């Protein structure tokens, strides 16, 4: 049976604790799952510590964030089977944790001045598992206070939107994408370019594929356009890249609800990831 190779928990900006996800996968007939929380080694270590849970094989993974400064957009890279002891990877995660916290704590302080009911401590309750305050945690606190009716609705765009810019938005300085790729490679990871449609990343993806910088492309994702899926499939065929699928599950912290198993990766592609990971660890 296939596996869902892109999921998030309370280790980053998901709403569901990590221990509950494998059973979700088992109940929809999946044999494998990757829990790929943002810029953290917690999901990686969990999978190494629990190689099989509820009959589901867990693949160590993290979703690393970079930035394409030429085109001014974020980039997400799924890194499978990285070495959790990699100094470069640990440094990346530490930097992103610090920068995210600084930005969201500043946003929270500004929100205290806007909404007298809001306190930063309430939002920090949602950062206990991750050690990082995310915008989704702030929005959960606002929703509890009756100051928002959803996580990613009108209130979110008023406060954290990009265009027009939100009232309290503070964005961390992201690491250049090629530096992040080098970090993933240094950690021995198998690197898959995530959801190219989300950040309109096809021009960058074409460059990286030609340069041999990525091992695969996430084709089956809820937000990928049919046109991008078709081109990505063609690129995978032309360059013999791994093609993956993942739901990008966030639980309740999502604009649209997609259950685990909505998008999946075939068995043969999971085997290719594992084979390449083994070669890089020799």
Image (tube, rainbow, N blue to C red):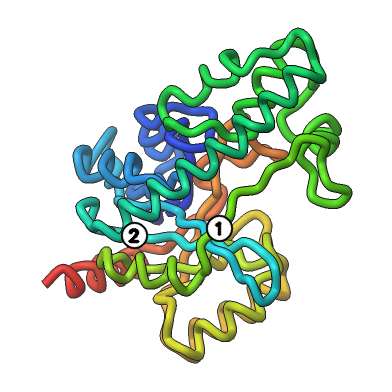
Q: How many other residues sit within 10 Å of disc 1, few (<14), some (14-19) or many (≥20)?
A: some
* Residue under the point 35% across and 52% down: 61
Quarter of the figure with residue 37? top left
Residue 263 in the image, given as x and y percentages of width and height: 54, 54
Task: Relative to 249, say whether 65 is above or below.
Answer: below
In this picture, residue 120 sits left or right of residue 159 = left
- What is the quadrant of the C terminus in the image? bottom left
Q: Are marks 1 and 2 in contact (CB under 8 Å)?
A: no
Foreground label between 1 and 2:
1
Label 2: element kind:
strand
Looking at the image, is mark 1 or mark 2 earlier in the sequence? Answer: 2
Task: Check disc 1 and report its element: helix, strand or loop.
Answer: loop
What residue appears at the point 71 percent right and 30 percent down from the top-left corner?
151
Mark 2 nearby-residue class (10 Å; few <14, some 14–19, many ≥20): many
Residue at the image point whose x is 70% and y is 74% from the top: 71
Q: Position of residue 218 (x, y in %)?
A: 52, 66
Which residue does the numbered mark 2 point to in the structure image? 80
Residue 64 to residue 121: above or below? below
Instruction: Say which of 111 and 12 sits in front.
Output: 111
Could you tell me residue 275's position as x and y percent?
23, 71
The structure residue drawn at horizontal position 34% and vertical position 59%, both measured from the top left corner, is 80
The image shows residue 165 at horizontal and vertical percentages of 83, 47
**Circle on res. 174:** 1
The N terminus lies in which quarter of the figure?
bottom left
Nearest the camera: 45 or 134?
A: 134
Q: How many marks?
A: 2
> Residue farthest to the left?
282
Give me the C-alpha separation between circle 1 and circle 2.
21 Å
Q: Which mark is residue 25?
A: none
């Amino acid at each position: 049976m296939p596996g869902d190779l892109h999921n998030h928990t309370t280790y980053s900006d998901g709403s569901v604790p990590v221990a509950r996800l494998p059973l979700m996968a088992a109940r929809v007939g999946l044999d494998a799952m990757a829990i790929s929380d943002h810029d953290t080694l917690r999901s990686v270590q969990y999978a190494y510590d629990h190689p099989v849970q509820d009959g589901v094989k867990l693949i160590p993974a993290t979703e690393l964030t970079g930035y394409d400064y030429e085109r001014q957009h974020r980039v997400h890279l799924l890194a499978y089977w990285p070495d959790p002891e990699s100094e470069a990877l640990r440094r990346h995660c530490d930097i992103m944790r610090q920068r995210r916290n600084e930005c969201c704590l500043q946003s929270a302080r500004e929100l205290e001045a806007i909404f007298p009911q809001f306190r930063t401590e309430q939002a920090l309750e949602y950062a206990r598992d991750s050690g990082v305050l995310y915008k989704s945690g702030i929005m959960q606190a606002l929703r509890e206070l009756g100051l928002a009716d959803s996580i990613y609705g009108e209130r979110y765009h008023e406060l954290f939107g990009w265009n027009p810019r939100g009232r309290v938005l503070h964005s961390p300085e992201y690491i250049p994408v090629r530096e992040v790729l080098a970090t993933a490679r240094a950690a021995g990871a198998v690197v898959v370019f995530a959801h190219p449609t989300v950040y309109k990343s096809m021009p960058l993806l074409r460059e990286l594929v030609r340069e041999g910088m990525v091992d695969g492309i996430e084709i089956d994702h809820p937000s990928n356009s049919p046109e991008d899926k078709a081109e990505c499939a063609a690129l995978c065929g032309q360059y013999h890249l791994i093609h993956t699928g993942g739901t990008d599950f966030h639980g309740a912290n999502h604009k649209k609800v997609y259950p685990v198993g909505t998008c999946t990766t075939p068995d043969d592609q999971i085997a290719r990831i594992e084979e390449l990971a083994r070669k890089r660890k020799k």
